Image: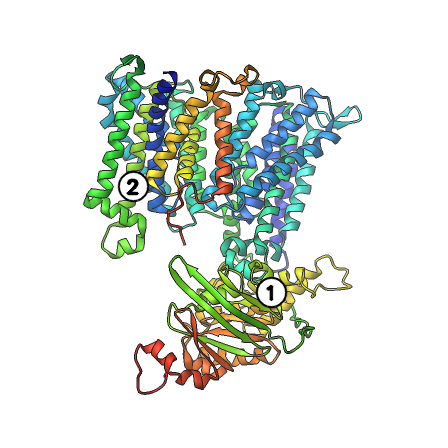
């Protein structure tokens, strides 16, 4: 029973990670550049929601469209400052510019909201419901539902619409797309907006249960990166699977002494959130060492 | 502009004077400590320049190395009461050992993986420091780290500590400058511009990157230890990402490869927040903004900016061509002449389902010019890539003077005397022609037999490399362009420059991938003449070309590939008239032979 409850929490966390990782991979595919500020976008989304909730105390679900809109706009501005001036430079330049923008985001949040952890309002309501003896947080269910809707929506957008076709064409081969009359720069800017909006929603979803501080972005970018690496650099579905794996591991690992009764008490101290992170990073290095192309192979385009 | 005053010498001297004057003007204990921190950060950035600037790899471990060293000093000093002579070397050794361990999985990764993987390592270090309370003091850290001292004597705070730290910073600056001076630094520039070209002149790029990584860890170790001694406390703050971002910002703002840039960056980013302290977090916003602005406007940092301003003012030191010295004449190889120079047998290569080469065999003798022809996609470039070790073969073998080189890495094959040029020219556009060639020559002098003997001058190899490079430029008729950046040259000269660079390896075999492409008729004739001239010194050439008249003028033999197979080989006029060759080029049989 405990296992199932933890699993639900893990999936909820994973759903939010997946949104962040998805945005990370979308930008990666469209530009070949790593957006280091994707984690700070999660943080920004959380604080945008908190700021809105201060003005207008309504459930998170009502704030969702506004968060999407505002972080999407932030993404557009982000691409205009951090990507386009550098697009013909080596990818490392973009990497550094996104680090710089991340520092700016962090400190704007610090100046505005201070360093204390804050929480976003719950999506629907606080509390739990009972499903056949299983106590599940309403927030967890809502998070999974929203994330699933967004992932599905993102899939429909990319696969079933004209715009999505142009976005994918741009990601696959920029020059060819341009030759076909696709407005490549517009598509890249939209990709940044989409990525920021996905991260922003992740911030809204996460910050209710896990709180948020201005410096949390580093943690989220690392999670997105690990998800993208495990799932195969450039693979959207792989990133989602990777995000789920990480989150379930993070939730389950500290609870192992409870789940596995025969573990000797002496090593119970080894199972904590901190050690879960350590194990995760070491596992990441192992994956890179054994399979540099990720678990499912790499498809992202390389910049020549 | 008067040439009597060497202005280029005056600038560093003026800078040095400012440095000495600074702590004499700002004398409060607090000011002195801040200035000591400038020296410490300068050491950190000098180290970071090796891996980030020179090797061009965005490592995010420098902060972690710094923090680890601070903890080594802190733990040994505060908990065990060890003193400086013991803790200082260990604080350097530990981060270097960590670097050795993580380099194995991390260094071969491409940029995006590399940066984030190194960040993961840094996070692990931070988490361990927070969690391993019994040793590290947890989130509170360790207080009571002793000052710098030995045998019971401790250096007082203030001027003595400052002088010691800056003394070490000076030594570090000299070492950094010495290791990367002149052409030596240019080898790294070649590596980060074109890894292929670097390997093709015999540079072991993996080793270069590895040594740069270890050097940066060692410098970070020095800085971290001094930091712990100066602040007398160690806390997890030294391992936070903030330190790494500061170091990165210092390198970007100051300059990524220049010694002076490390000092600019450290000075600005340590002093400015002190002056703008009243701005608090707004300052950090400006800090991010400054980093962003620099990367967009002045990617070479302040050091690069000053250079550009200096160049505009005409302060560039006048350059004179070093007096040319000919390369040593090729020693005869001690291999029986029956053994061909190059023998390729049964080479097969598939890319996925596409067969690029199928059972290809041929030989090249000493002093021979072999033309390699074939329609687009017939496998010519793949063949050259396999011979030079850039692409592994699926089956078959390549022998150079009887020795199996099939599985040797590209740089070793280059060192064995196989040089090449590229279809898409791979030069460093920002480097002068002389530098482009001298890098290859210096690499050859470092590995080959041509090491200058009996010279007492420390920089004899450097000097000789440049003079021999001057000779090679002269031989290819490019002396006038010696100080021209390679990027400014016309196509014909760029091809010649690439050949000059290849000749710097004293090759026995030279592979040219479409050398006549993009050249006009006069340039082609000139090139043909020069290639024939090369043969007289015993050098063998394999020339890939679509331009058959050009090949007819120089080649002793032609080999024709089609769909990965050799369809004809032998006397040029026979091959040209061969029905299979004509069919391969035209699909059907025209009335005459090839044009």
According to the picture, the residue beneath numbered tag 2 turns out to be A191
Tag 1 and tag 2, C-beta contact below 8 Å: no
* Left-right relation of A22 to A262: left
- The image position of residue A170, as x and y in percent, is 29, 49
Q: Residue at x 24, y 34 (%)?
A: A152
According to the picture, the residue beneath numbered tag 1 turns out to be B404
- The image position of residue A32, as x and y in percent, is 38, 46
- Comparing A61 with B54, the one in front is A61
Q: Residue at x 51, y 60 (%)?
A: B390
The numbered dot on residue B113 is: none
Marks 1 and 2 sit apart, C-alpha to C-alpha, by 51 Å
Q: Secondary structure at mark 1?
A: strand
- The image position of residue B141, as x and y in percent, is 59, 20
The vertical placement of B425 against A188, above or below, is below
- When asked about the image quadrant of residue B423, the answer is bottom left
- Of labels 1 and 2, the one closer to you: 1
Q: Given the image, what chain letter belongs to the residue carrying mark 1?
A: B
């Amino acid at each position: 029973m405990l296992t199932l409850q933890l699993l639900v929490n893990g999936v909820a966390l994973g759903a939010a990670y997946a949104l962040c990782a998805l945005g990370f991979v979308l930008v990666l595919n469209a530009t070949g550049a790593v957006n280091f500020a994707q984690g700070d976008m999660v943080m920004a989304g959380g604080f945008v929601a908190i700021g809105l909730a201060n003005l207008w105390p309504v459930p998170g679900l009502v704030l969702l469209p506004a968060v999407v809109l505002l972080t999407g706009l932030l993404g557009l501005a982000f691409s205009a400052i951090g990507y386009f001036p550098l697009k013909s430079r080596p990818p490392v330049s973009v990497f550094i510019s996104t680090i710089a923008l991340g520092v700016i985001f962090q400190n704007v949040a610090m100046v505005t909201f201070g360093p204390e952890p804050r929480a976003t309002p719950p999506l629907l309501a606080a509390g739990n419901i009972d499903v056949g003896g299983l106590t599940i947080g309403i927030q967890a269910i809502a998070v999974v539902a929203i994330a699933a809707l967004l992932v599905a929506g993102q899939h429909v957008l990319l696969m079933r619409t004209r715009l999505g076709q142009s976005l994918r064409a741009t990601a696959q081969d920029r020059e060819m797309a341009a030759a076909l009359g696709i407005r490549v720069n517009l598509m890249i800017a939209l990709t940044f907006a989409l990525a920021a909006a996905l991260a922003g929603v992740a911030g809204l979803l996460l910050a209710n249960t896990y709180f948020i501080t201005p410096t949390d972005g580093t943690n989220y970018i690392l999670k997105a990166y690990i998800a993208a690496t495990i799932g195969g650099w450039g693979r959207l579905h792989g990133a989602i699977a990777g995000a789920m794996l990480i989150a379930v591991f993070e939730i389950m690992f500290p609870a192992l002494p409870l789940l596995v009764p025969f573990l000797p008490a002496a090593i119970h101290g080894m199972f904590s959130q901190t050690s879960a992170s350590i194990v995760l990073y070491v596992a990441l290095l192992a994956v890179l060492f054994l399979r540099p192309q990720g678990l499912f192979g790499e498809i992202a385009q390389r910049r020549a | 502009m008067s040439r009597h005053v060497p202005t280029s010498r005056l600038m560093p001297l003026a800078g040095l004077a400012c440095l000495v004057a600074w702590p004499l003007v700002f004398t409060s204990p607090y000011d002195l400590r801040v200035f000591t921190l400038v020296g410490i950060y300068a050491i950190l950035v000098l180290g970071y320049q090796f891996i980030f600037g020179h090797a061009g790899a965005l490592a995010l471990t420098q902060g972690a190395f710094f923090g680890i060293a601070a903890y080594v000093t802190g733990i040994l000093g505060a908990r065990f009461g060890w003193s400086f002579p013991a803790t200082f070397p260990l604080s350097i050794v530990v981060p270097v050992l960590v670097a050795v361990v993580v380099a194995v999985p991390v260094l071969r990764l491409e940029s995006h993986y590399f940066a984030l993987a190194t960040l993961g390592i840094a996070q692990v270090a931070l988490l361990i420091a927070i969690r391993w309370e019994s040793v590290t003091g947890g989130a509170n850290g360790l207080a009571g780290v002793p000052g710098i001292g030995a045998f019971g004597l401790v250096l007082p705070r203030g001027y003595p500590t400052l002088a010691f730290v800056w003394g070490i910073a000076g030594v570090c600056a000299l070492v950094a400058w010495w290791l990367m001076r002149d052409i030596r630094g240019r080898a790294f520039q070649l590596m980060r511009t074109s890894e292929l070209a670097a390997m093709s002149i015999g540079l072991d790029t993996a080793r270069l990157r590895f040594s740069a990584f270890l050097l940066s860890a060692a410098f970070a170790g020095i800085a971290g230890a001094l930091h712990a001694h100066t602040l007398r406390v160690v806390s997890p703050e030294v391992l936070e990402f903030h330190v790494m971002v500061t170091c990165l910002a210092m390198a970007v703002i100051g300059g990524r490869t220049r010694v002076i840039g490390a000092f600019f960056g450290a000075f600005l980013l340590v002093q400015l927040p002190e002056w703008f302290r009243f701005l608090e977090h707004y300052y950090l916003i400006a800090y991010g903004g400054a980093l962003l602005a620099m990367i967009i406007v002045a990617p070479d940092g302040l050091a690069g900016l000053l250079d550009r301003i200096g160049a505009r003012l005409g302060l560039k030191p006048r350059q004179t061509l070093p007096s040319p010295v000919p390369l040593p004449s090729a020693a005869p190889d001690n291999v029986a002449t029956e053994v061909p120079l190059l023998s390729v047998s049964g080479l097969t290569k598939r890319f996925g389902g596409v067969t690029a080469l199928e059972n290809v065999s041929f030989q090249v003798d000493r002093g021979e010019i072999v033309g390699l022809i074939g329609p687009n996609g017939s496998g010519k470039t793949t063949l050259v890539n396999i011979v030079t070790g850039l692409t592994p073969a699926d089956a078959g073998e390549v022998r150079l003077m009887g020795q199996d080189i099939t599985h040797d890495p590209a740089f070793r094959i280059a060192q064995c005397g196989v040089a090449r040029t590229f279809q898409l020219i791979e030069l460093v556009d920002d480097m002068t022609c002389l530098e482009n060639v001298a890098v290859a020559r210096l690499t050859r002098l470092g590995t080959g037999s041509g090491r200058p003997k009996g010279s007492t001058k420390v920089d004899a190899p450097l000097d000789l490399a440049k003079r021999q490079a001057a000779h090679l430029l002269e031989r290819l008729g490019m002396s006038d362009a010696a100080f021209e950046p390679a990027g400014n040259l016309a196509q014909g000269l760029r091809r010649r420059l690439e050949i000059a660079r290849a000749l710097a390896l004293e090759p026995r075999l030279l592979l040219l991938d479409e050398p006549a492409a993009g050249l006009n008729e006069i340039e082609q004739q000139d090139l043909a003449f020069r290639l024939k001239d090369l043969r007289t010194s015993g050098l063998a050439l394999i020339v890939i070309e679509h331009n058959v008249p050009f090949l007819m003028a120089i080649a002793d033999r032609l080999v024709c590939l089609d769909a990965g197979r050799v369809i004809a080989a032998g006397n040029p006029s026979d091959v040209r008239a061969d029905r299979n060759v004509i069919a391969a080029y035209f699909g059907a049989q025209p009335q005459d032979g090839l044009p």
